[in-house]
Amino acid sequence: MFPIRDRAPTKGFPIITILIILVNVYFFVAELLAPDPDLFILKYALIPQLINFSDIPTLTPFLTAQFLHAGFLHIASNMWFFWIFGDNVEARMGKIPFLIFYLFSGTVGFFVQYLFLSNSEIPMIGASGAVAGVLGAYLVFFPRARVDVLVPFFPLFFTLALPASTMLFYWFFIQLFSGVATIVAETSSVGGIAYWAHIGGFGTGYLIAHLFSSPRPKRQTSFF
């Protein structure tokens, strides 16, 4: 299932969502135009074997790698999911908290994936963990919102309007099943996809969103 649009109304202008998309596009173009794209990726990607938690500069790729992508399909799919679900989460959280939340989700997603391949020399890149965090938060905030999805039934395609909870649980369990499969197969990823980064980001978003959803204690008023 591939989401086409969601039907939850958006309050306010999603400036942070748009800026994050523009920054991702900027770095993707810079990557394509770099004299040596491979060297550009190696400079900013997260390479697990090079991580040293006692050496702060080696940890910056947990952030910078979030803005690199492996190709047009990679960035297009990430930014499409982010555009559909990000604006509503931004409106619910507030602009600066949403920005911090996005980067933190991506960082945790990379860290979870790192735990499974800490000795790997393969660069890890992409916004998938951060976007997955947004999906996890959307599930908490808007579980009943309708999402139009494209469903392939080869050679035909048709659309369905599903509750966000149905679509996002389906997405998550696909990631979880694939992530477990990588453990069984003793591989870090399948087809170059870091499923545990998706799982880590989604779980982070789901948990943090509950902090924003917690009911505030009512003020007690005394009458004299």
Image (cartoon, rainbow, N blue to C red):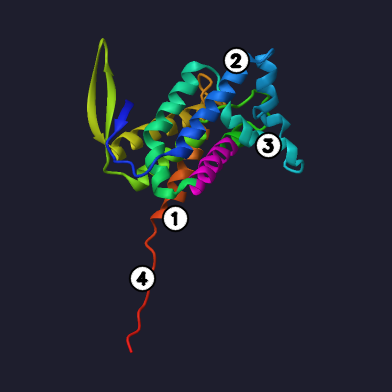
Badge 2: residue crowd in 10 Å (few <14, some 14–19, many ≥20): some
Q: Amino acid at mark 1?
A: Leu
**At 34% across and 37% down in the image, what residue appears?**
169
Circle 2/circle 3 CB separation < 8 Å: no
* Any part of residue 52 in sight: no
Estimate the x, y position of residue 164 in percent, counting from the top left. Answer: 30, 38
Which amino acid is tagged 3? Thr
Q: Residue at x 37, y 43 (%)?
A: 12
Task: Give the mark nearer the N terminus: 2 vs 3.
Answer: 2
**Disc 2 or 1, which lies upstream in sequence?**
2
| Disc 1 packing (10 Å; few <14; some 14–19; many ≥20) | few
| Bounds of the magenta segment | 96-111
Q: Residue 155 versus residue 83: which sits nearer the camera? A: 83
Q: Residues within 10 Å of mark 3 (few under 14, many from 20)?
A: some
Real-space Cα distance between discs 2 and 4? 54 Å
Q: Which residue is mark 4?
A: 218
**Magenta stretch prevailing secondary structure:** helix
Residue on which the image places disc 3:
60
For the residues labelled 3 and 1, say whether their Cβ atoms are less than 8 Å apart. Answer: no
- Tag 2, which secondary structure? helix
Q: Identity of the amino acid at label 2?
A: Leu
Circle 4 crowding by C-alpha within 10 Å: few under 14, some 14–19, many from 20: few
Looking at the rendered image, the disc whose residue lies closer to the viewer, 4 or 1, is 4
Disc 4 or 1, which lies upstream in sequence? 1
Dot 1: what SS?
helix
Question: Residue tagged by mark 1?
Answer: 211
Which kind of residue does numbered mark 4 sit on?
A: Lys
Residue 209 lies in the magenta-colored region: no
Where disc 4 sits, the SS reads loop
Q: Position of residue 54 (x, y in %)?
A: 76, 43
Q: Are marks 2 and 4 in contact (CB under 8 Å)?
A: no
Q: Which residue is mark 2?
A: 32
